[in-house]
Structure formats: C-alpha cells, structure tokens
Image (cartoon, grey):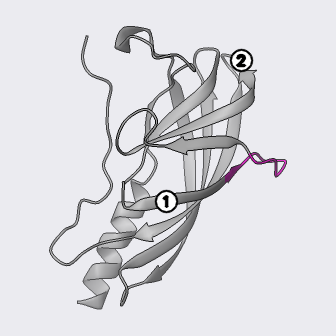
C-alpha cells in the first residue's frame, strides 16, 4: 500500500504546476490572456507517506509568448507555496487563489518580454493524497472562446 501511495504522489507531483494562463494585474477577457510555453520541469520531492504530506521544489523553465508581468499556474488547493525565486535567488511576489481556486499567480518586478525564456523555483508543501483519492492535482485550461 505504501508503494502505491508513493507512486500516486509521484504521479501527482509530475502534474503539479501546469501552466494555466498569464494575466495582467487587471482581470482580462479569456480571449486576451497572454500565454507561456513551459519548456521543462524539475521536481525534487520529500514524501511523508504516514502523514500523507509532501514538501517539494519545482524548477520551471518557460518561454514568454506575450509581454506580461504575471504568470498563473494551476496548483492543488492542498498545497501551500512558501516561496518563489528567480535563477539569481531573488524572491518574487506570488499569491494563491487570487485568480481563482487552485491558482498560483506569480508577479515579476519587471515585465517579461515576448520571446524571452525565464525560470522560477517554487517551494511548496502540503497534503499529498488522502486514502481513496488520487486526483489532488489537476491541469486547467482556459475556457473555450
């Protein structure tokens, strides 16, 4: 059972931070939301299967497809972000659930230019899996226009 729980936690971690959309500080219409292209993820996780808890660091590299200063990712509501840093180790502002339930907004001090690539490191922890559930982390997509 422990192996199954660990496998399910690992599978969920692989899906932990799918990009949802980019938004500016003001709410935008779904059809005008800037987008990113995630290049890759590297996730280092520490699991506590007896307590059903996980703590992890996800390094995410992504290309900016439209100028923006805010990036939004889907993140399980069971997880809590402690900090987000740039490759230089500079902490950036973030907010959970600002853009909606299960959303992580990352605010950059300077606008990110279209065509550029950047990397962030997200440190988070929380409940991993409760008995009988496997889908604590989900990918979300913008509503069709």
Q: Residue at x 37, y 86 (%)?
A: 51
Q: Nearer the viewer, residue 101 or 64?
A: 101
Q: Nearer the viewer, residue 73 or 38?
A: 73
Q: Secondary structure at mark 1?
A: strand
Residue reaching furthest to the left: 132
Q: Which residues are magenta?
A: 84-91
From the viewer's perspective, is residue 89 above or below residue 5? above
Disc 1 packing (10 Å; few <14; some 14–19; many ≥20): some
- The C terminus, quarter of image: top left
Q: Nearer the viewer, mark 1 or mark 2?
A: 1
Percent of width and height locating residue 39 = 57, 39
In this figure, which residue is indicated by the disc labeled 2? Answer: 113
Residue 46 numbered tag: none
- Precedes in sequence: disc 1 or disc 2: 1
Location of residue 69 by image quarter:
top right
* In magenta stretch: residue 89: yes
Q: Quadrant of residue 29?
A: top left
Foreground: 111 or 119?
111
List the residue tagged with mark 1.
80
Q: Label 2, secondary structure: give it.
A: loop
**Left or right, 103 with reference to 25:** left
Q: Position of residue 70 (x, y in %)?
A: 60, 27
Which residue lies at the image location 82% right of the left edge and 52% below the top edge? 89
**Which quarter of the rendering shows the N terminus?**
bottom left
Residue 71, image x and y in percent? 56, 31
Q: How many marks?
A: 2
Q: Residue at the location (66% across, 16% down)?
A: 114
Mark 1 and mark 2: span between their CA atoms? 28 Å
Label 2 CA crowd tier, 10 Å (few <14, some 14–19, many 20+): some
Residue 11 picture location, percent across and down: 34, 64
């Amino acid at each position: 059972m422990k192996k199954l729980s660990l496998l399910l936690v690992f599978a969920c971690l692989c899906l932990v931070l799918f990009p949802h959309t980019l938004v500016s500080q003001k709410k935008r219409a779904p059809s005008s939301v800037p987008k990113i292209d995630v290049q890759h993820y590297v996730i280092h996780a520490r699991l506590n299967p007896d307590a059903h808890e996980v703590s992890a660091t996800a390094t995410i590299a992504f290309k900016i497809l439209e100028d923006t200063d805010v990036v939004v990712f889907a993140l399980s509501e069971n997880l809590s972000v402690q900090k987000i840093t740039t490759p230089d180790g500079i902490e950036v502002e973030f907010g959970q659930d600002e853009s909606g339930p299960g959303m992580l907004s990352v605010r950059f001090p300077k606008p990110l230019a279209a065509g550029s690539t950047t990397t962030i490191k997200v440190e988070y922890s929380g409940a991993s899996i409760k008995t009988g559930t496997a889908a604590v982390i989900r990918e979300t997509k913008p509503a069709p226009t």
